[in-house]
Amino acid sequence: MIRLPPRTPIALTALGVAPFVIGSIGAYTDTVLTLFPYRSVESVIHYGIIILSFMTGILWGFASKDDGKSSYAYITSVLPALYVFFFVVGTDADRLEALMFGFAIILSIDLSFQQAKLAPNWWMSLRIPATLVVLASLYLTRISV
């Protein structure tokens, strides 16, 4: 049974994806959202790096629920941060493509944690829409480069 997430995680996730949307819009124009200074390709890339790394911390928290029974959860939880360090490099286009791949992969990690009952039962109903918005924003930013 799919449960809806609590209101607070929904609101915070919406706030968390907003910089991706604002940045991708800003990649196309200087006149939109002028009150928001972080509206560029570079800001989308930097924010993507931050959030992908942030997700590592969330996954580590989920892994700790396993009480050390399996090292798989711990190892998997640190992969997004290592991925950012080693692979989100190069031109803006390269980094945006690497971030798109990273966010797609982390969704599969989320699913494996959900199936292992390490994540809340509402986790995927929050992560799937958020990831789709992030991927769309990264893609739109990528084609602007």
Image (tube, rainbow, N blue to C red):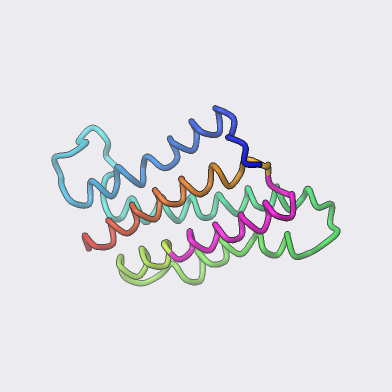
Residue closest to the eye, 115 or 72: 115
Confirm whether the magenta stretch covers residue 128: no
Q: Main secondary structure of the magenta part?
A: helix
Residue at 32% over, 59% down: 139
x, y (%) of residue 122? 62, 40
x, y (%) of residue 57? 63, 50
The image quadrant that residue 142 belongs to is bottom left
Q: Which residues are magenta?
A: 101-119
x, y (%) of residue 14? 44, 36
- Please indicate whether residue 90 sits to the left or right of residue 104 in the image: left
Q: Which quadrant: the N terminus?
A: top right
**Which residue extends farthest front?**
1
x, y (%) of residue 31? 13, 40
The image quadrant that residue 111 belongs to is bottom right
| 133 shown above or below 98 | above
Q: How many marks?
A: 0
Confirm whether the magenta stretch covers residue 102: yes
Q: Which quadrant: the C terminus?
A: bottom left
Residue closest to the eye, 108 or 100: 108
Residue at 41% over, 70% down: 89
Residue at 35% over, 54% down: 136
The image quadrant that residue 80 belongs to is bottom right
